[in-house]
Image (spheres, grey):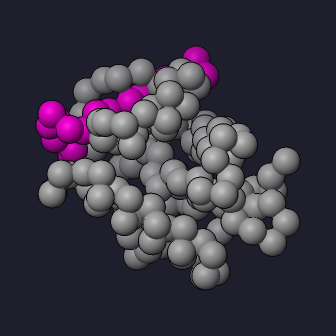
Amino acid sequence: MFEIREDDLTGDQVRDLLALHLASMHRNSPPGSVFALDLSGLQVAEVTVWTAWRGPRVAGVGALKMLADGNGEVKSMRTHPDFLRMGVAATILETIIAAASARGARRLSLETGSGPAFEPALALYRHRGFRNGAAFSGYCQSEFNQFLHLDLTRA
């Protein structure tokens, strides 16, 4: 079981996990194809970040960005390597879905990459009901990136 907390991003463990996330995105994506938010991008009013904890250790992080059209976007999903395959990401994703619904979003979307490094996350999203679809919120379609959407009116 994990404790989910809304996070202000001031803790070293969380900042280290976010740095790991950004480094992995850059390592596994072509130049110009990384849209992961840095620390300052996560500390804006339209973004809420949650962390999962087991005891004193951070197990994962994820964020909801509310978009200008009233829908939501999943951002910065990352499980700490010591907690892989333990349900961390699914727990955070459910928190994000519930928050987006409570805020009146009708759709929750995300942008991600393609290739082996992205397959575990894609499996999670598709298992939860996200489906591939069109680019959104100013993103441009490429051979590398893909867009998934969850209809919250049916979730």
Residue 152 within the segment the image draws in magenta? yes
- For image coordinates 38% across by 70% down, the residue present is 38
- Asked which quadrant contains residue 154, the reply is top right
Position above or below: 151 against 144:
above
Q: Is residue 150 visible?
A: no
Q: Which residues are magenta?
A: 138-155
- Quarter occupied by the C terminus: top right
Position above or below: 44 against 27:
below
Residue 3, image x and y in percent? 81, 56
Residue 134 within the segment the image draws in magenta? no
Q: Would residue 125 be found to the left or right of residue 5 on screen?
A: left
- For image coordinates 36% across by 37% down, the residue present is 116
Q: Would residue 14 be found to the left or right of residue 113 on screen?
A: right
- For image coordinates 34% across by 41% down, the residue present is 112
Q: How many marks?
A: 0
Position above or below: 54 against 126:
below
| Closer to the camera in the image, 77 or 154 | 77
Q: Would residue 116 be found to the left or right of residue 120 on screen?
A: left
| Closer to the camera in the image, 4 or 106 | 4
| Closer to the camera in the image, 11 or 106 | 11
Q: Is residue 128 visible?
A: yes
Residue 67, image x and y in percent? 39, 49
Position above or below: 95 against 78:
above
Residue 143, image x and y in percent? 15, 33
- For image coordinates 69% across by 65% down, the residue present is 58
Residue 137, image x and y in percent? 27, 44
Q: Would residue 138 be found to the left or right of residue 6 on screen?
A: left
Q: Main secondary structure of the magenta part?
A: loop
Q: Name, please, the residue furthest toward the top.
A: 154
